[in-house]
Every structure is written in structure tokens, then in C-alpha cells.
Image (cartoon, grey):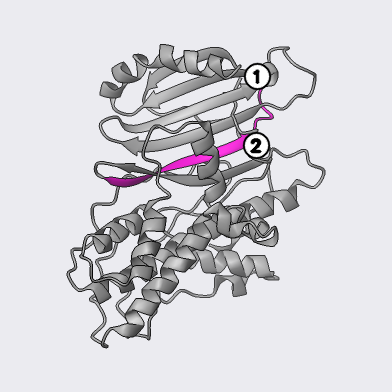
Amino acid sequence: MAIGSVPPVIPEAPVPVGHPGRPFTRPGGAETGGGGSAGPAVPDVSATLPSATPLDRVVAAALARQDGLARLFAGVAALARSGDDLPSALQAALSRLTGTALRDPPDAAALRAAVARFGLFHEALALAGALRASGDMKLILAELRAALSAFLAEVPPRPAPAPERQRDRLPPPRPGQLPPAQAPDSGFPDEHDLAVLARRLIDETDHALARIALHQTSVLEEAAARGDGARPLAMSLEIPIAGAAGVSLAAVRIERDDHADGDGRGAPGDPTFRVEIAFAVEPLGPIHARIGLMAGRRVVAGLWCEDPAAVAPLEAEVATLRTDLEAQGLDVGAVEIHIGRPPPLPKPQAQPPHRVDVAL
């Protein structure tokens, strides 16, 4: 079978999409009250679509701003290290964001909370009145942006920061593909001026909010395009992980696997799920995982190590992994470790072009 996935923890929901990002220069425009600098001039691509819907416009705006979250976490760490002169509200907002990163080896409850916290369910939680208790990432980022803006409103005006050198944006999520893992960002520019650093963090916060919005809109798109419900259900997200070198982002994709053949266990028509995970932490380097959850609570897993030196330490943990999974009532099948990257998955049937691809 095409190794399946594991998310009964999460309601069945669809997956993200996108288009490779174009390089951009971080802005150094004129200073405004408490906000960040204006982003680079980007044409309104939604205007080129035959009939732009509100969702088209949301996607187009998010594509113009999105970038990875690792840089935001690096900037937050830099500002937090800058001293005790920050307002208490800003210090609290910084702590809330850094507190979203997993630190200890997570159990099932911690992973479930990390998935729920990413922001995919932000509006549903808000409607249910449960947003504040959820520790939702979009809420945390909005509060951080407000705290940064309030801080900047209190400091004397000064020249805008010099623009950073041009660099490539992280590609946005794409349909049928696992987003790239994000290693800790070590390139955040050194800056002793707290106001300059705060302005740059407002930009990074906007980039992060736009990226989460693209994950959300892709779920909505696939739900609408599914029609009779025959299309696989999928979703993707990113989970921050704290390490010695900083915060990295694990990419996670969860989907119903209609290509799985099953093994005759369980009731006919029982769904098979596949979860794909990519992360990059030292000393293992980039790791890719595919985990399948089949009927009868049967689970199979494959791990791919880009660094051959990571194989031995992972193999040493396979027996423990089996024991832990069996303790959860799972029937553990193959657990295999490979060198390299996982092979491509079967391509889905032809689908109508996604608005993100059309927009770009």
C-alpha cells in the first residue's frame, strides 16, 4: 500500500496548496505609527482572475505576504534577549508565542494540542467562544502584533531600518504535497535598536499569519471541490519544535489514503489514513516519516534519513517505538528505516486548477 496516515485525532478536513514563492526584498519604507514597513509592491493578481471571489482575494493577498515561521521565532528570541526594558504586555506576548513550541518528547495529548493550536480552526473556535482557552496561533500572533505596535507608538520616531538583502521566500503549501520542513533560522540580522527589531517582527508576524491563512483556504477549497465527498480528505500544518539551535518547524500533512489496498481487517469501506511528517533537528538532520493507520487499528511506518549517520540512532529506538504503539492498543506492522527521501506518492486523478496556481 501507499503508506497510510494517522489522524482520527483531527476531524477529516482537506489540504493546502500553493505555488513556488518569488524572491522578495524585506521592506525599508517610510515609518508609520506603530506598524511594520509596507511590503514590496505586488500586483493585485486577483484582478486578473475571470471572476475573483472573496476567497480569491484572500489567497492572492496571502501569497503576496506569506513566508516561513522559523524566521519569526528567531526574531522573537532576539527581541526577548534584548533586555528587561520591554513593556510587560510585549514580554507576555513574546512568551506566549515561544510557549507554543514543543520542548520535551511529545505524547499524544501534546501532539493533539499542537495540531489544534496551529490556527486551522481559528474561526470555528471563535464562533464557539473557545478561542481564548485554545491558545490558538492566529490569536497569539494577532496579540503579538498589537503589542509590537503599541510599543512602537511609544518610542520616538526615527529613520526606517535599512532593507534586508534579497532572499527567497519559503514556498507556500501546495495540494498533494508536504510543505517543506523549516530548520532554525540563523540569518536574522543583528540589531541593537529595539524599535527596528520590533518593526521587522511586525513584518514577520504578517508573513506568518498569511501562511496560516493559505493552509486554511486550501482546506476550504478542497471541501468545496470535493462535491460528492469522493475526493480524499486532507489538511496540512506546521508544528514549532524548540531545540538547542532555535525553533524549527515540522511540516505535517494528514489525509485519507484512497490508494491504500488494506489487508482485509476491519469492516469494508473503513478509511485508511496517511500522515506525512518532515522535520530537521540536530544531530539527526532532515527526517521524513510516513505513517499509515488502517482498519483494525493497524499501523505501519517508514522513516527516511537524508543523513546516513541518523540511521543507527533511529534503528536503536525501533523496539521502543513498537512497544509504545502496542501499549496504545495498536497492531504494529512494518517499521522501516531508509536512507534518502521517500518516493513520490501516487498522483490523484486530474483535479481542476487551484486558485493559488491560477493566481500565479
Residue bearing mark 2 = 348
Q: Amino acid at mark 2?
A: Pro
Q: Position of residue 239 (x, y in %)?
A: 45, 44
Q: CA distance from mark 2 to mark 1?
A: 25 Å
Q: Quadrant of residue 146?
A: bottom left
Q: Which residues are magenta?
A: 246-260
Query: Is residue 55 shown left or right of residue 146?
Result: right
Q: Is residue 68 visible?
A: no
Residue 138 magenta-drawn?
no
183 above or below 314? below
Q: Residue furthest bottom?
A: 157
Q: Is residue 256 within the magenta segment?
A: yes
Question: Residue at point 64% right, 61% down?
Answer: 126
Which mark, by number, is residue 297? 1
Name the residue type under label 1: Arg
Residue 140 in sight here? yes
What kind of secondary structure does the magenta stretch mostly adopt? strand
